[in-house]
């Protein structure tokens, strides 16, 4: 049977590379690129069709950071497909990143140096803002829009006798201490990216608890450090070329076998011999917090559904979450 795969943020970077790989693995796929920028999406589709001439590649307009766009896109998906096999939640932003150069040099000579290179702990801050729905933009894009999408697509994802999978592109930058359940949108901090990625790790756990019995499974992956528009937004490309030898040395890890554990994040790594492999690592998440986050997201969903139906001002949202 032809498998249906949807990838958000598929027009560049990791999303586009993933699509290439998926078509190489299964040329019969029905692949849907869910992107906010139509021009870039069309360019990505053409590039994919150049290397996979007979592939079936659809385009879907989706701005995952806009509640209305998620609802409209989900309607379109339900009209086009009768089920979804894989939903890759990959779209993500890190707006206005700032590197703390002083902390970097201090970290270089500390015992924390390996961890610093792996996770950017203490090095990176961002400037977030409110979007037109009245939500923090990073939370809305990296987490909540995807949550709404899952909720809207449940009829296609939870079907009797069929297994569907959700795969979140998380990050090694996801950190418990950057996330607060009292401030899940990260209105008050300077690490919205880290917070949103930790929230997606935690949400994945809750999704597994609530949806496994309906045939829906969620997993979290960590792509490591990849040169994309996102990383070029942190430092210019010549800088990356300069520090690449240090970064490369850092990614020397031992290979381990893979098992799909709901509490593990699947890290994509490269060995000293240049072999790519995946290593599951336990996430710092817990059931209780994942349950609270899940119910808070459901509350927020009720609010935005009310907002979407009534077309009210965004201010209500800000006060109620
Ligand atoms: N690069 C890295 O080292 C790492 C990246 N990641 C994660 O990988 C994912 C992909 O990022 P990466 O490939 O690096 O960066 P890119 O900037 O190349 O890709 C991000 C993709 O997300 C899309 N996107 C952003 N905002 C929205 C939105 N509101 N609606 C729909 N699509 C949107 C972008 O589309 P558009 O062209 O319209 O902006 C783009 O296609 C992200 O979730 C990121 O956090 C995780 C760990 C490391
Ligand atoms: C001379 C210096 C100013 C060099 C600073 C190096 C840092 C820019 C990088 C060290 C670890 C990197 C890292 C990321 C960004 C760049 C670093 C902070 C990510 C946060 C990028 C996006 C992710 O999701 C995870 C990455 C972890 C490591």
Image (tube, rainbow, N blue to C red):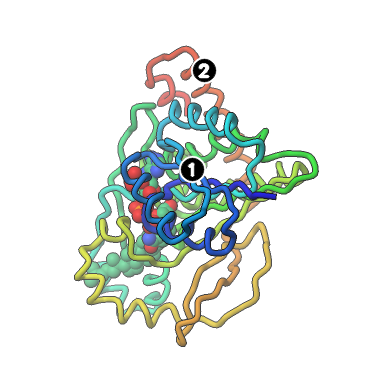
Circle 1 residue: 58
User: In the drawing, does residue 113 fall left or right of residue 99?
Assistant: right
Contact (CB < 8 A) between labels 2 and 1?
no
Comparing 197 with 270, the one in front is 270
Dot 1: within a 10 Å radius of its alpha carbon, few (fewer than 14), some, or many (20 or more) residues? some
User: In the drawing, does residue 205 fall left or right of residue 233?
Assistant: right
Comparing 13 with 236, the one in front is 13
Residue 191 visible within the image:
no
Circle 2 residue: 306
CA–CA distance in space, label 2 to label 1: 31 Å
Query: Disc 2 or disc 1, which is closer to the eye?
Result: 1
- Figure check: 309 above or below 7: above
Which residue appears at 33% of the width and 33% of the height?
Answer: 130
Which residue appears at 61% of the width and 78% of the height?
Answer: 256
Comparing 47 with 318, the one in front is 47
Element at label 2:
helix
User: In the drawing, does residue 199 fall left or right of residue 13?
Assistant: right
- Figure check: 24 above or below 137: below
| Numbered badge on residue 70 | none
Residue 301 visible within the image:
yes
Quarter-of-image position of residue 299: top right
- Figure check: 270 above or below 81: below
Element at label 1:
strand
């Amino acid at each position: 049977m032809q498998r249906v795969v949807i990838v958000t943020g598929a027009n560049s970077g990791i999303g586009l590379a993933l699509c290439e790989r998926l078509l190489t693995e299964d040329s019969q796929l029905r692949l849907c690129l869910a992107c906010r920028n139509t021009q870039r999406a069309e360019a990505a589709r053409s590039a994919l069709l150049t290397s996979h001439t007979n592939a079936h590649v659809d385009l879907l307009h989706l701005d995952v950071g806009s509640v209305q766009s998620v609802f409209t896109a989900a309607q379109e998906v339900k009209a086009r497909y009768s089920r979804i096999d894989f939903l890759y939640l990959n779209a993500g932003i890190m707006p206005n990143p700032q590197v703390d150069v002083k902390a970097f040099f201090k970290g270089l000579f500390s015992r924390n140096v390996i961890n610093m290179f792996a996770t950017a702990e203490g090095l990176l801050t961002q400037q977030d803002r409110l979007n037109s729905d009245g939500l923090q933009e990073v939370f809305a894009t990296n987490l909540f829009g995807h949550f709404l999408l899952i909720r809207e697509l449940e009829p296609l994802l939870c079907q009797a006798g069929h297994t569907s999978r959700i795969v979140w592109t998380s990050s090694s930058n996801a950190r418990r201490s950057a996330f607060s359940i009292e401030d899940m949108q990260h209105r008050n901090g300077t690490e919205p990216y880290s917070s949103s990625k930790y929230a997606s790790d935690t949400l994945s756990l809750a999704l597994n608890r609530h949806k496994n019995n309906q045939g829906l499974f969620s997993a979290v992956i960590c792509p490591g450090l990849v040169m994309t528009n996102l990383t070029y937004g942190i430092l210019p490309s010549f800088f990356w070329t300069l520090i690449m030898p240090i970064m490369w040395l850092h990614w020397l890890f031992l290979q381990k076998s893979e098992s799909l554990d709901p509490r593990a994040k699947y890290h994509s790594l490269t060995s000293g011999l240049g072999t790519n492999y995946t290593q599951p690592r336990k996430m710092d998440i817990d059931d209780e917090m994942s349950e609270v986050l899940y119910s808070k997201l459901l509350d927020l969903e009720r609010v935005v559904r009310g907002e979407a139906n009534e077309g009210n001002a965004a201010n209500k949202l800000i006060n109620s979450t």
